[in-house]
Image (cartoon, coloured by chain):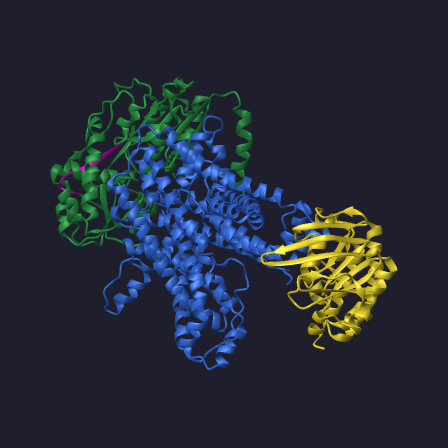
């Protein structure tokens, strides 16, 4: 369970407030106009930007001051999710260990995960030799291997076509459910929010709203969402 | 970002502290041994004036010539273009004494140029005197300036030039709207860096300067030491030199130095206007001839003596290579520590760290050498320190260039992959091994090559410490000349030239192979 | 390949064999110890008889050698210093580091009478301008040179021993008129180099008609290269004399051995090595005489030299004149 208690993120003149709870295992979409602060919110939860007020808790533990790698969070960024000089397997193994030579058990996990995301046999390639969709799968696989209960996705599939993106979201949902992950994903496409299911957080006017039921939110959008959707 | 930065900043502070300690400490040591309080005489002021004058002209001319050359290289494609771009790297890493010999083979009284002018019945030109010094400095630094500017040109997205073409911009409008902003952002930094390099010129001024009116500060330091044994004045002059450089260095950091050192110079801009093709070609041809013929002349004059070189020369070459490798490693360790810290530290601290790294340009090798001698002599036999100290001093002299290559690269890597690395918990050694070192192969290869090549050709420090058995190749070259063995000396010069270019090339290539996008 | 490995074996072997033998540290200038200088031959010859280990330490040229000695002061490791010259003797004596040698009675083959109780002369030469045989009318005096359009290469007196020699030469020949001579020479000077090597190298590359060197320089070309095209121009004013000297360090633990070395340095065996390695005249003529080729060299009638004691004052005055004349 992720709790944002009166969180305030100030960046120059811009200020974002968030005060909500996401239950464990929920799959939550974040939607809002560009510049509304969606990425900033995820970065604050991931520990990449300091917050200026409030606290963040995971399952009751205060993680506000924890460094990124000590938080229960794995993040998929918009890009640069893979080290281009390392092979697919090596990139994925980094989710498990920083050792120079991963153990046999770790290697086995990597191979199984490669299979699970449909990339068996591609472990020795470097990211440059993969298609955009394949790269997204590797990045997702690594984030899942990181074995952190909270998965944050900052529009990592934005560059993919609609069909491929839907497929990736399907994969994300499947993996998250299998492993009981809590998931937050930024999107600007209502379609993605529906695919993810469950709940949606609307970010507008310097506020991150409480998670709302996705179907209900889009069937009766508040004014700020309505103007974003152009309806 | 702030998290986990402290140890790395500390490391960079230690590295910068070592550099400052070495430079300031040796000046203090020299001043401490001074027998009387020192004052600067009229000749010293003349030396300061001349130093600034020639450095300014060298910088202005290098950059002025580099503008059309870089533009021509940026927008023309021709067979051998990448070879020309590679050759642009050569003069900068040439050992100074070797390069001066090469320049004389072309521009000397008995050189090819005057032979040609004579055959046409034209009056001869002279390379000696103050303008000869400037010419030699342009030879060394035109390539550097061109690299700076070429990098800037290639950083303009080709769409912008295409847009200009589709909007029907003529050359004047293209220049005003696209090229002028680019030059305004690049030229001051490039000029200041070259100015800095030229302020510590020693061997060039010595050989081509032609007398007391062309004395540089570094030469005045040498004379104070050797002729008058006036250590106080040597220390004072070293401080003046340090002051000049610090002021110029602060300016450099203020105007944002362009990132010339990376790679990617073999791209070209898609925009290739038909107009100006002849002038571009002429510019490239003239520059290539200017930069290549002196090197060619050295090769021609030295090749006959190469097989017969005495064994002692080969031993000296081995020592030089070993010293160069050590110097390269040390330069990398220090520069990388500072670069990692600069990227993480607060702006003010970052600037101080950067400036400390830049001081290497200002340091007088003679004062560092003498200071180290004073400090170490009571404890260690000087001859045992000859090679380590040559490596150390050259590592510090190469740091300013290594930093210019490493800092932007580290900044880019951290911007692109810093969050991913934080998320994965990569810190300290793991971050270096998994992220920094592999992503920085190119600038690391370049910096190591540069440090190694500069160290190969250096004569500054070793002379005071070396005994009969620890001569480096440049020192051996001088010994050959001192023993009337001019032909063997030209063979040794060619060997030195070849080794310097080779060691640079190997490192630079090493940084490029298998470099994934 | 073999002869490049042998020295290495030698390095390994010597310390073991000579472990208990006393070590004689000899400080000298750089070109003395190079493979082509007198150092290696002298070392072999001396070690045959002394049951000691002779070690050379080289520091630049004569003036840098003195600077190093002054930096080291009383803690110096040196037992013997070889290669100071007449222009440095007064300053070297001032350091108080040198021991009296006690060779006063020895007969020297020098152009002037030698009297110095600290320093022993070991070789000498005259400064002279060297030119190619093809130069049609070489000038016979500084005045002729100044009036001619013959180009010359000289060395900076502040960084080079021959350069300082030339400064003193003009001063000794012209006294108060020296500055005028320098003004006259300024348009003949192609460039002023840091040291002898650069100037001589440029001369051989054809960069000027004449170069400041020694009357003995043509001997190198004749003997080592079988080339008699290089000649020294005799000057009517006479030629300035350079005498190279050696001295023992008073605080040395091996003072007896140091004296033995000074004795050896002026012996027939060592003196006969110097002409064709250091390319100077020996301070004591060997029994076998000078090597063939030396008889072709010019023999100046007048030897110019300032007394060592007056030098510090004269050289700073002469330098000021030189700076003034050539800065214009």
Where residue B260 appears, as percent x and y from the top left, is 49, 59
B510 or B4: nearer the viewer: B4
Location of residue C100 (image quadrant): top left
Q: Which residues are magenta?
A: C235-243
Location of residue B375 (image quadrant): top left
Where residue B213 appears, as percent x and y from the top left, is 25, 48
**Looking at this rendering, what residue extends furthest in the right direction?**
A178
Where residue C114 appears, as percent x and y from the top left, is 22, 25
Q: Is residue B191 left or right of residue B499?
A: left
**Looking at this rendering, what residue extends furthest in the front direction?**
A223
Which chain is yellow in the rendering? A
Quadrant of image for the N terminus of chain C? top right
Which chain is green in the rendering? C
For chain B, give the colour: blue
Q: Is residue C271 located in the magenta-colored stretch of the structure?
A: no
Q: Is residue B285 above or below residue B254?
A: below
């Amino acid at each position: 369970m992720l709790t944002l208690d009166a969180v305030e993120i100030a960046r120059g003149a811009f200020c974002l407030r968030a005060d909500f709870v996401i239950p464990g295992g929920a799959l939550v979409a974040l939607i809002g106009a560009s510049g509304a602060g969606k990425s900033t919110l995820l970065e604050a939860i991931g520990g990449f930007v300091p917050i200026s007020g409030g606290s963040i808790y995971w399952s009751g533990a205060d993680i506000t001051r924890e460094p990124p790698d000590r938080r229960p969070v794995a993040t998929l960024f918009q890009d640069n999710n893979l080290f281009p000089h390392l092979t697919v397997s090596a990139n994925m193994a980094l989710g498990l260990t920083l050792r120079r030579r991963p153990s046999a058990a770790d290697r086995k996990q990597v191979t199984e995960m490669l299979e699970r995301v449909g990339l068996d046999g591609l472990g020795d390639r470097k990211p440059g030799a993969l298609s955009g969709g394949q790269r997204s799968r590797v990045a997702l696989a690594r984030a899942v291997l990181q074995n952190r209960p909270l998965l944050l996705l900052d529009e990592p599939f934005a560059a993919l076509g609609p069909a491929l993106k839907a497929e990736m979201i399907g994969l994300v949902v499947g993996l998250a459910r299998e492993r009981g992950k809590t998931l937050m994903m930024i999107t600007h496409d209502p379609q993605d929010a529906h695919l993810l299911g469950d709940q949606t957080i609307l970010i507008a006017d310097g506020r991150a709203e409480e998670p709302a039921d996705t179907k209900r939110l889009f069937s009766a959008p508040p004014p700020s969402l309505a103007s974003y959707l152009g309806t | 970002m702030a998290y986990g930065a402290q140890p790395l900043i500390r490391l960079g502070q230690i590295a910068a502290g070592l550099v400052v300690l070495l430079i300031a400490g040796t000046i203090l040591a020299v001043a401490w041994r001074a027998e009387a309080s020192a004052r600067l005489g009229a000749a010293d002021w003349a030396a300061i004036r001349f130093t600034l004058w020639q450095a300014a002209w060298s910088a202005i001319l290098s950059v002025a010539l580099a503008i059309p050359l870089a533009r021509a290289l940026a927008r023309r494609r021709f067979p051998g273009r990448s070879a020309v771009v590679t050759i642009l790297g050569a003069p900068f890493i040439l050992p100074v004494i070797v390069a001066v010999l090469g320049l004389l083979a072309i521009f000397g009284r008995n050189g090819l140029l005057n032979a040609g002018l004579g055959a046409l019945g034209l009056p001869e030109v002279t390379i000696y005197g103050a303008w000869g010094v400037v010419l030699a400095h342009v030879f060394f630094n035109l390539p550097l300036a061109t690299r700076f500017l070429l990098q800037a040109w290639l950083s303009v997205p080709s769409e912008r030039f295409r847009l200009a073409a589709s909007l029907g911009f003529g050359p004047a409008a293209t220049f005003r709207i696209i090229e002028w902003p680019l030059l305004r952002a690049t030229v001051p930094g490039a000029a200041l860096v070259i100015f800095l390099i030229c302020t510590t010129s020693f061997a060039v001024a010595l050989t081509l300067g032609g007398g007391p009116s062309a004395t540089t500060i570094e030469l005045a330091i040498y004379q104070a030491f050797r002729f008058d044994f006036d250590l106080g004045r040597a220390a004072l002059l070293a401080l003046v030199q340090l002051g000049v450089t610090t002021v110029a260095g602060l300016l450099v950091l203020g105007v944002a130095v362009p990132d010339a050192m990376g790679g990617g110079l073999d791209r070209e801009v898609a925009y290739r206007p038909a107009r100006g093709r002849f002038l571009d070609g002429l510019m490239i041809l003239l520059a290539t001839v200017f930069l290549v013929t002196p090197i060619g002349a050295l090769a021609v004059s030295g090749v006959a003596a190469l097989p017969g070189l005495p064994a002692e020369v080969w031993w000296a070459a081995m020592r030089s290579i070993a010293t160069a490798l050590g110097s390269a490693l040390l330069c990398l360790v220090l520069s990388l520590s500072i670069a990692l810290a600069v990227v993480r530290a607060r702006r003010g601290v970052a600037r101080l760290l950067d400036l400390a790294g830049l001081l290497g340009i200002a340091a007088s090798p003679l004062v560092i050498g003498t200071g180290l001698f004073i400090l170490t002599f009571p404890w260690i036999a000087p001859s045992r320190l000859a090679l380590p100290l040559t490596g150390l001093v050259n590592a510090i002299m190469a740091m300013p260039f290594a930093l210019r290559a490493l800092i932007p690269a580290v900044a880019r890597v951290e911007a692109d992959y810093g969050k991913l690395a934080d998320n994965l918990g990569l810190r300290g050694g793991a971050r270096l091994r998994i992220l920094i070192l592999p992503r920085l192969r190119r600038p690391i290869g370049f910096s190591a090559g540069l440090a190694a090549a500069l160290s190969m050709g250096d004569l500054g420090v070793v002379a005071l410490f070396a005994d009969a058995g620890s001569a480096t190749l440049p020192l051996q070259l001088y010994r050959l000349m001192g023993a009337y063995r001019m032909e063997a000396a030209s063979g040794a010069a060619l060997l030195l030239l070849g080794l310097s270019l080779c060691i640079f090339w190997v490192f630079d290539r090493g940084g490029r192979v298998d470099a994934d996008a | 390949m073999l002869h490049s490995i042998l020295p290495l074996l030698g390095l390994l072997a010597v310390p073991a064999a000579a472990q208990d033998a006393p070590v004689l540290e000899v400080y000298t200038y750089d070109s003395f110890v190079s493979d082509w200088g007198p150092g290696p031959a002298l070392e072999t010859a001396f070690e045959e008889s002394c049951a000691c280990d002779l070690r050379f330490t080289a520091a630049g040229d004569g003036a840098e050698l003195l600077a190093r000695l002054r930096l080291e002061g009383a803690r110096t490791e040196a037992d013997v210093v070889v290669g100071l010259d007449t222009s440095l003797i007064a300053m070297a004596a001032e350091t108080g580091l040198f021991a009296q040698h006690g060779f006063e009675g020895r007969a020297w083959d020098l152009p002037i009478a030698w009297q110095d109780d600290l320093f022993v002369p070991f070789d000498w030469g005259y400064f002279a301008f060297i030119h190619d045989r093809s130069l049609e009318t070489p000038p016979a005096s500084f005045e002729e040179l100044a009036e001619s359009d013959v180009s010359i290469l000289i060395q900076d007196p502040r960084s080079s021993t021959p350069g300082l020699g030339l400064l003193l030469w003009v001063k000794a020949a012209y006294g108060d008129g020296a500055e005028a001579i320098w003004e006259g020479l300024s348009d003949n000077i192609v460039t002023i180099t840091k040291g002898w090597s650069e100037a001589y190298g440029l001369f051989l590359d054809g960069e000027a008609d004449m170069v400041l060197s020694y009357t003995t320089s043509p001997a190198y070309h004749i003997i080592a290269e079988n080339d008699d095209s290089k000649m020294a121009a005799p000057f009517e004013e006479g030629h300035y004399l350079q005498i190279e000297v050696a001295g023992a360090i008073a605080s040395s633990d091996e003072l007896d051995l140091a004296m033995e070395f000074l004795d050896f340095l002026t012996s027939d065996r060592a003196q006969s090595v110097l002409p064709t390695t250091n390319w100077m005249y020996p301070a004591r003529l060997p029994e076998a005489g000078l090597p063939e080729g030396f008889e072709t060299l010019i023999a100046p009638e007048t030897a110019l030299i300032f007394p060592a004691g007056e030098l510090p004052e004269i050289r700073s005055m002469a330098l000021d004149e030189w700076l003034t004349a050539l800065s214009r």
